[in-house]
Image (tube, rainbow, N blue to C red):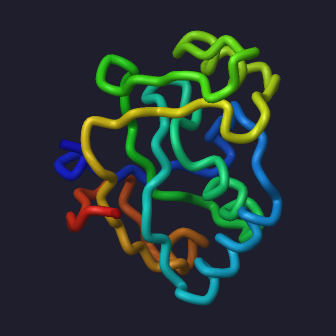
Amino acid sequence: MLCSLPIHFVPVKQIRPNECHYSNHAMALADVILHEQLWRIPIALERTSHAVMDGHHRLRAAQQLKLKYVPCLLLDYDYVKVHATRDSYLVNPEEIIRRARTGELYPPKTTRHLFPSPFPLCNISLPLLQGQAELRPSMTSQCSLAS
């Protein structure tokens, strides 16, 4: 299912995190992306708020690399389920979006989103995301599934 959705190039500044991240993990991802010169897995965003569903560490890596755009899947909570991984936090779509809008971030890995199928691989060259080449607002993924 996710494989048939278009991948959108969303400006990094328009994406709203709702969880903190582990700095070492984000730096390691940034190193891999820079070394490969490819972005492989899109970030999952809630369609209207651009709240991150999956990809907080990828978002931070993009910020560290000063990318202008990142490949994203725009999804609805009608098709994506979510639950808390920590008992002491309220986790539901409304609370996630509220936290994304206010900047009141959950601790890392507090939410767990369950997607209807694996994410597609997108393999987008880094110069496109840096704004060094012409970029269309969306594209259909060349679908292979992320493991």
- Quick check: 17 left or right of 4? right
Q: Where is residue 138 in the image (x, y as percent from the top left)?
A: 33, 53
**Vertical placement of residue 129 versus 83, above or below:** below
Figure check: 24 above or below 94: below
Task: Quadrant for the N terminus, please.
Answer: top left
Number of numbered labels in the structure image: 0
Q: Where is residue 109 in the image (x, y as percent from the top left)?
A: 67, 39
Q: In which quarter of the image is the C terminus?
A: bottom left
Which residue is at the front of the view, 132 or 109?
Answer: 109
For image coordinates 65% across by 66% down, the residue present is 67
Picture coordinates of residue 2 (x, y %)? 25, 45
> Residue drawn at (52%, 43%), measured in percent from left and top?
54
Figure check: 102 above or below 133: above
107 vs 56, nearest the viewer: 107
Quadrant of residue 121 within the rendered picture = bottom left
Taking the view exactly as shown, the residue that stands out farthest to the bottom is 35
Q: Is residue 53 left or right of residue 76?
A: right
Residue drawn at 78 percent across, 41 percent down:
20
| Residue shown at the point (39%, 50%) measured from the top left | 8
**View extreme (front): residue:** 87
